[in-house]
């Protein structure tokens, strides 16, 4: 349990340091710089560092520490719950940034900057976490350093099934995120944490359930077992397809590409009241403006 306690201390330290950076940057930097650069950079670093440490526990913990999947899933839920509350509106996920671009909530330049800083943040997290493992504070880290020399792919299924699994995970994740996008973070964060935990439990054995292209690239693209083209198809093509399908199902169109609603008919803004019949008047039909003509009864 000592190794687990060290990992929990690592999670808390990463979150605390990233939160301090966010708060200081918000006060000292212009709002546009904070939202477009610092917020995404720090949140991406926080997400990737925690994911790397959690993945290490998932691989080594069951036989090296004696704890089962229930501990990993509990940690995953708590970590994503904290992410949802502390990210301050950042996504740390390229598919969410592209979704914001497609619904015209973000410009091309702003989206490109977000994608770049997400990549930089996660690469920085990989470097920092590897350096932290080199201290070998626990036996887990010693074993991790030995395994890192020849890590294996997270794809444990066929290529097309892997694409389908990542696509389905991304589809449900984005559908839930769209449904609760305007909810308060205290309500949205638990829902997304439960969604991520459920998807990880269901799809984790097949692909690792990343549904985050940049996170997958940092964590598993350098491992042996699959070529780069296969990694790109599973971890980039799958999540992007799932995001597009969720967006189309949720609102019926993709505003950046086409305005016509393919699934839902627009609802009329006005509603014609249903009045009671007036004695002495007779309804004779529509006058062409959605109203009934009447004439006095003789």
Image (tube, rainbow, N blue to C red):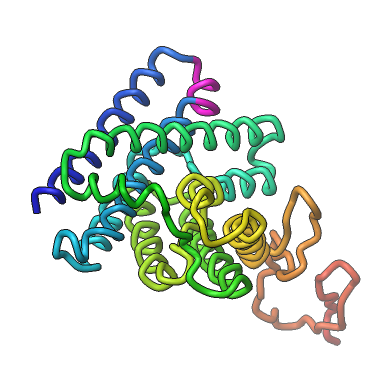
Instruction: Give the position of the N terminus as an image quadrant.
Output: bottom left
Instruction: Give the position of the C terminus as an image quadrant.
Output: bottom right
Horizontal side of residue 166 vs 89, given as left or right:
right
Horizontal side of residue 202 vs 61, given as left or right:
right
Q: Is residue 138 visible?
A: yes
Q: Which residue is outermost to the top?
A: 28
Residue 48 rendering spot, x and y as whole percentages? 40, 43
Which one is nearer the viewer's eye here, 268 or 114?
A: 114
The residue depicted at 41 percent of the width and 67 percent of the height is 204
Which one is nearer the viewer's eye here, 39 or 187?
A: 39
Q: Which residue is outermost to the right?
A: 288
The residue depicted at 40 percent of the width and 47 percent of the height is 149
Is 126 above or below relative to 237? above
Residues drawn in magenta: 30-37
Overall secondary structure of the magenta section: helix
Horizontal side of residue 259 vs 107, given as left or right:
right
Horizontal side of residue 32 vs 146, given as left or right:
right
Is 65 above or below relative to 287? above
Residue 282 rendering spot, x and y as whole percentages? 80, 84
Magenta stretch encompasses residue 135: no
The residue depicted at 63 percent of the width and 55 percent of the height is 232
Residue 243 rendering spot, x and y as whole percentages? 61, 59
């Amino acid at each position: 349990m000592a190794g687990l306690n060290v990992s929990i201390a690592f999670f808390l330290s990463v979150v605390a340091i990233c939160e301090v950076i966010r708060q200081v940057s918000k006060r000292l930097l212009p709002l546009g710089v904070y939202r477009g650069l610092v917020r995404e950079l720090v949140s991406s670093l926080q997400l990737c560092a925690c994911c790397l440490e959690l993945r290490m526990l998932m691989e080594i913990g069951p036989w090296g520490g004696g704890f089962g999947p229930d501990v990993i899933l509990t940690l995953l839920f708590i970590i994503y719950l904290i992410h949802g509350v502390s990210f301050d509106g950042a996504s740390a996920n390229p598919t969410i940034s592209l979704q914001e671009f497609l619904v015209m909530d973000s410009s091309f330049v702003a989206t490109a900057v977000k994608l770049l800083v997400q990549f930089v943040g996660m690469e920085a997290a990989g470097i920092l976490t590897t350096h932290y493992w080199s201290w070998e504070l626990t036996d887990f880290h010693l074993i991790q350093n030995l395994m890192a020399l020849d890590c294996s792919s997270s794809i444990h299924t066929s290529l097309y099934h892997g694409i389908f699994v990542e696509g389905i995970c991304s589809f449900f994740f984005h559908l839930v995120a769209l449904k609760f996008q305007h909810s308060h973070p205290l309500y949205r964060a638990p829902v997304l944490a439960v969604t991520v935990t459920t998807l990880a439990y269901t799809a984790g054995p097949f692909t690792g359930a990343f549904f985050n292209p940049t996170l997958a690239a940092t964590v598993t693209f350098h491992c042996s077992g699959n070529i780069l083209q296969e990694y790109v198809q599973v971890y980039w093509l799958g999540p992007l397809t799932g995001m597009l399908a969720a967006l189309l199902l949720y609102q019926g169109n993709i505003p950046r590409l086409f305005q016509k609603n393919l699934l839902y008919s627009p609802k009329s803004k006005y509603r014609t009241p249903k009045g009671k019949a007036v004695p002495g008047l007779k309804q004779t039909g529509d006058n062409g403006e959605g109203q009934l003509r009447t004439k006095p009864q003789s």
